[in-house]
Image: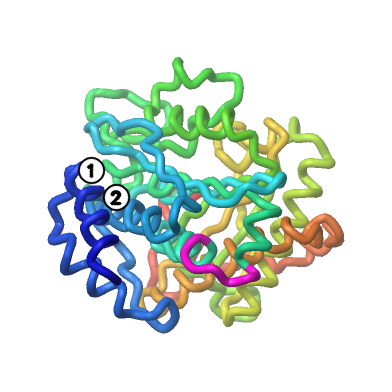
Amino acid sequence: MSLKPRIALLSVFVSAGLLVAPAAQAAETAETSVDGRTVDPRPSTAKLAFELHKLALLSHGKIRVDKIGRSNEGRPVWAARVGHGKTRIQYVTQQHGDEPLGTPAALEFLRQVGVGHSPWAQKLLSKVTVDIVVRANPDGHERDWRYNYDPDATPEYGEKGKGYDINRYHDPAVAPKDNPATEAGLIQRRNASFKPDIMVDYHMQGRYRDANGREITASTLWPTNAGVKQSDVDFAKQIAVVVQRSIDGNGGYVSQYPGGDYQGIARNGYGLLGNGSVLIELSLIPEREQQQIQDALASMLAIARTAADGSVRKVDPAKADAIPPRGPALPGTVEEAHEAA
Ligand SMILES: [Zn+2]
């Protein structure tokens, strides 16, 4: 990296109030390659902001970073947008603060499609626009817990003394201004202004097997609320098959997720709004953490590519019903107290 962009980088970091040894980090990143790096699975929210602004600068304007609002404790909630194509895709990561791995995958996605001038990325960005809410729940991340931070609330969905379960507050009947879960309202607003064709929500789950005892590494599901139009369910199923193929093809093993029908779950809420709405749950497998990030990245790339070339619309939605069901928890692991989605 030449001196000039480094000075520009510095001014960005200073104006963003990010005093995180910028010169050293910029130099370090410039010297490492995109592939084969160890990715930070749990960047601090300050480091996340630093990385997003660095990617925006390195992309020469292709990646646009916005602060879409603030958490209850005043932390910025960031979104990044890349591409200028007609088909619109939204990814959301880390609604649950203790389910982090979609966030580093999002950074890698932005790096791969937004930095550099590879012909495939240029073509992709002419066909799709991808908007990512990166770490929807920074306060929950800070505490390594599921909920946002609202200790005085008595939430219908959430935990008294902690906060709301953001992923139960996407009911389209509740306007963002009336949404008691602040960060869910931010996602609602971003979704309403962006109007995506495709919406994919990244979460994490415990460890599970299939019926034969083989460990599954991720689960996926489409809207199951009865009010979602059949054509929108079918489109979500087509996306889910792309998810399965991309993750299985990357060395993972995808099952269906046994999720609920409640309209406040993002998967259902944005399905009711006509998005092709899909949930992805990465299993918490400590020894497979880097690969889980790579699998999430593979799904992000595959969804964007198949949306760009139209092939997602040619998938047989019935193939989603053939994705194997999730079996029991792995012996010695704790069955979840809550539905993780
Ligand atoms: Zn979750």
Which residue appears at 77% of the width and 44% of the height?
233
Please name which of the two marks, 2 or 1, marks the residue nearer to the observer.
Answer: 1
Q: In terms of depth relative to the viewer, which is nearer, 317 or 57?
A: 57
Residue 340 visible in the snapshot: no
* Label 1 Cα crowd, 10 Å radius (few <14 / some 14-19 / many 20+): few
Residue 326 is drawn in which quadrant? Answer: bottom right
Q: Residue at x 35, y 46 (%)?
A: 146
The image position of residue 310, as x and y in percent, is 80, 57
Marks 2/1: CA–CA distance: 8 Å
**Residue named by callout 2:** 49
Residue 256 vertical position relative to residue 81 in the rendered view, above or below: below
The amino acid beneath tag 2 is Ala
Measured as percent of width and height from the top left, residue 264 is found at 55, 32
Tell me the quadrant of the picture where the N terminus can be found. Answer: bottom left
The residue closer to the viewer here, 52 or 244, is 52
Numbered circle sitting on residue 340: none
**107 and 129: which is toward the camera:** 129
- Residue 270 appears at what percent x and percent y? 63, 36
In the shown orientation, is residue 302 left or right of residue 111?
right
**What secondary structure is marked by label 1?**
loop
Which residue is at the front of the view, 266 or 122?
A: 122
Residue 301 placement: quadrant: bottom right
Q: Is residue 269 magenta?
A: no
Q: What is the three-letter code of the residue carrying label 1? A: Ala
- Tell me which segment is drawn in magenta: 114-120
Which percent across, then down, holds residue 138?
30, 44
Question: Which residue is label 1 attached to?
Answer: 16
Q: Residues within 10 Å of mark 2 (few under 14, many from 20)?
A: many
Q: CB at mark 1 closer than 8 A to ligand 1? A: no
User: Would residue 113 be seen by someone viewing this image from the given angle?
Assistant: yes
